[in-house]
Amino acid sequence: MKSLQLTTIIRLFFRWIFICLIIGVCAGTASAFFLQTLDWVTNFRETHIWVIAFLPIGGLLIGLLYHYYGKDVAAGNNLLIDTIHEPKQIIPFRMAPFVYIGTMVTHLLGGSAGREGTALQMSGAIADQLSKPFHLSGEERKIVIIAAIAAGFGSVFGTPFAGIIFSLELLRIGKLKYTAFIPAAAASLLADQITRLWQTPHTHYAIATIPEITAINLFYTVLAGMAFGLCAMIFCKGMKLSSDFFQRIIPFPPLRPMAGGILVALAIWLIGTTKYIGLGIPGIVESFETQQPAYDFALKILFTIVTLSAGFKGGEVTPLFFIGALLGNALSLVIPVPLSLLTGIGFVAVFAGATNTPIACTIMAIELFGFDITLYALIACVIAYLISGNHSIYEKQLTGESKYNKWKTYLNLDKL
């Protein structure tokens, strides 16, 4: 009997290793191809500014593509999360090419969007195709998609350990799905290495000064974390209100990104800069080095909300990095903490508040900025997570446990 159990365990182990190998290789290769072509279209746009005039037409084409051929994959990341919560039919493979095309058009023509949504959807759509040949059960499909999310996130940002925790922390606020830890770890670590083997560079950020940990510095970090959490909440609410607005005033879906494209293109023409469109990487890098205009983060919020709520494709995470970094940069005007430190913790904390993933964001900070930032990043991310409430950029993210129930019990607030 023991020999039979051992044989079963070994067989299952190698079966999952093989599945994760396929996910890691496919996700890493897809991310490498995506990132390299994204760099190309971004460089083309910046050297041929006139293409931004075609943003409304690009929006219309994206809208038509999804309206007539992609309604079942239009939910994007929310479809992945929904499938993990309640597996139904296999995610159509066309999600991968559709979101890739939509993202390329968005960035080429001047929309303000990110890249994590594309990486996650490409990885998830590819991974779920393994369900039939491997005869995966519903529970096994959940694990496969979680592993795909880890692989997509880890490889697209070059932060595999953050990718692991993000995939587990994303699904349900306040709870982690530990049963998927090993597959997520294997897929994320492998996908990151595959992306690097394809010689795909990642942006490097540097915090010039990390001050000594003192009570006053930690107090300032708490204040900054509160600002980051409020910013995350405003972004989430803005996305929801703007999406509802576009749906209410424009009944025909393909016309929504066209209208959004007109607004964004006109705004770019009026302000005379492309700083707030695309990924915004140059702006993020500059924010670690020099003082930037205090309104930069607010403009990026507006550009991103209009772009994505109208129906363009990409993701919210890299714009949230920009928003958080530039808000931290602005806070350095009133909080006596080194500029690059506030920029760095803002980079991850606004993201933590908007996705309810404080642990993953703390680990991301360590991977990007080094171990010395750990305590500052952890405090900022947890405070932002608490202040942002139960808001999220992912509508299908469930509430496993309210953020405030235990605090109410500890503080005896139920008796008040």
Image (tube, rainbow, N blue to C red):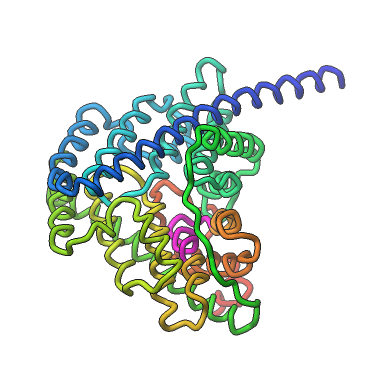
Residue depicted at x 14% and y 58%: 269
Q: Is residue 1 magenta?
A: no
Whether 75 is drawn above or below 92: the answer is below
**Quadrant hosting residue 98:** top left
**Quadrant hosting residue 212:** bottom right
For the stretch drawn in magenta, the main secondary structure is helix
Please provide percent x and percent y for residue 258: 14, 44
Q: Is residue 353 magenta?
A: yes
- Is residue 261 toward the left or the right of residue 351 in the image? left
Whether 88 is drawn above or below 410: the answer is above
Spot the residue most to the top: 133
- Is residue 51 toward the left or the right of residue 91 in the image? left
Please provide percent x and percent y for residue 287: 41, 66
Q: Which sits in the foreground, 237 or 204?
A: 204
Magenta-tinted stretch: 346-357
Whether 228 is drawn above or below 354: the answer is below
Q: Which sits in the foreground, 164 or 87?
A: 164
- Is residue 410 among what the camera can see? yes
Residue depicted at x 63% and y 68%: 375
- Is residue 320 toward the left or the right of residue 166 in the image? left
Residue depicted at x 26% and y 42%: 44
Quadrant of the snapshot with the N terminus = top right
Please provide percent x and percent y for residue 278: 30, 50
Please provide percent x and percent y for residue 64: 17, 33
Spot the residue most to the front: 47
